[in-house]
Image: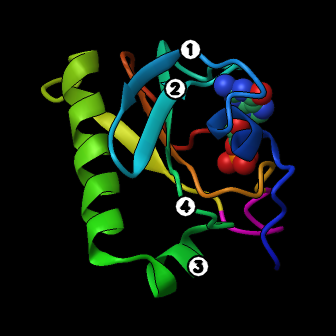
Amino acid sequence: MAYDPDNIFAKILRGELPCKKVLESEHSLAFHDIRPLSRHHVLVIPKGAYVSFDDFSAQATPDEIVDLMRTIGEVARMLGVQESGYRLLSNHGEDARQEVQHLHFHVCGGQDLGVMLR
Ligand code: 5GP
């Protein structure tokens, strides 16, 4: 799938739509999910134009990959869930019901999350 520069997260990255920012780094942005599924629910996205984990894993630079992973870890520490536990989730494609076509990792925690996220 080709990257659509008009997707919601691209607009957030360009400052055209607001977000509740948690953390920003050179290559990544973390912000609160607008419809939280758990007490803490933060989305971490790369600033680059990647549809999902599929193209990111194949095309992102090592710097972008490391930056995204470190930002996710830092977000978990900021939320204070590194001890109690948290869940990382990234949906790719139709079967996973990916809603927004810009790679994002859900960071969910702050409560017992059960077996499935939803
Ligand atoms: P997906 O199903 O693609 O893995 O998850 C997309 C997530 O983006 C959903 O959890 C949804 O609540 C969130 N979301 C959709 N639109 C917006 C928005 O405009 N702002 C924020 N902060 N989150 C959004």
Q: Is mark 3 within 8 Å of ligand 1?
A: no
Looking at the image, do the residues carrying marks 1 and 4 touch, with CB atoms under 8 Å apart?
Answer: no
Q: Residue at x 17, y 29 (%)?
A: 82
Q: Classify mark 4: helix, strand or loop.
A: loop
Looking at the image, do the residues carrying marks 1 and 2 touch, with CB atoms under 8 Å apart?
Answer: yes
Does 6 appear above or below 58? above
Q: Residue at x 63, y 64 (%)?
A: 49
- Residue 42 in view of the camera: no
* Circle 2: residue type: Phe
Q: Which residue is mark 2?
A: 31
* Circle 1: residue type: Lys
* Circle 4: residue type: Gly
Does label 1 or label 3 sit earlier along the sequence?
A: 1
Does label 4 or label 2 sit earlier along the sequence?
A: 2
Looking at the image, do the residues carrying marks 3 and 4 touch, with CB atoms under 8 Å apart?
Answer: no
Instruction: Name the spot of residue 33 as percent of width and height, x first.
Output: 62, 25
| C-alpha distance separating marks 1 and 2 | 5 Å
State the mark number for residue 77.
none
Query: Position of 49 compared to 64: left or right?
Result: right
Q: Classify mark 1: helix, strand or loop.
A: loop
Q: Classify mark 3: helix, strand or loop.
A: helix
Q: Is mark 1 within 8 Å of ligand 1?
A: yes
In front here: 41 or 24? 24
Ligand 1 located in image quadrant: top right
Please tell me whether the stretch drawn in magenta is mainly helix, strand or loop.
loop
Q: Which residue is mark 1?
A: 20
| C-alpha distance separating marks 4 and 2 | 16 Å
Q: Tell me where the magenta segment starts and ends, as one range.
A: 92-97
| Front tag of 3 and 2 | 2
Q: Which residue is mark 3?
A: 54
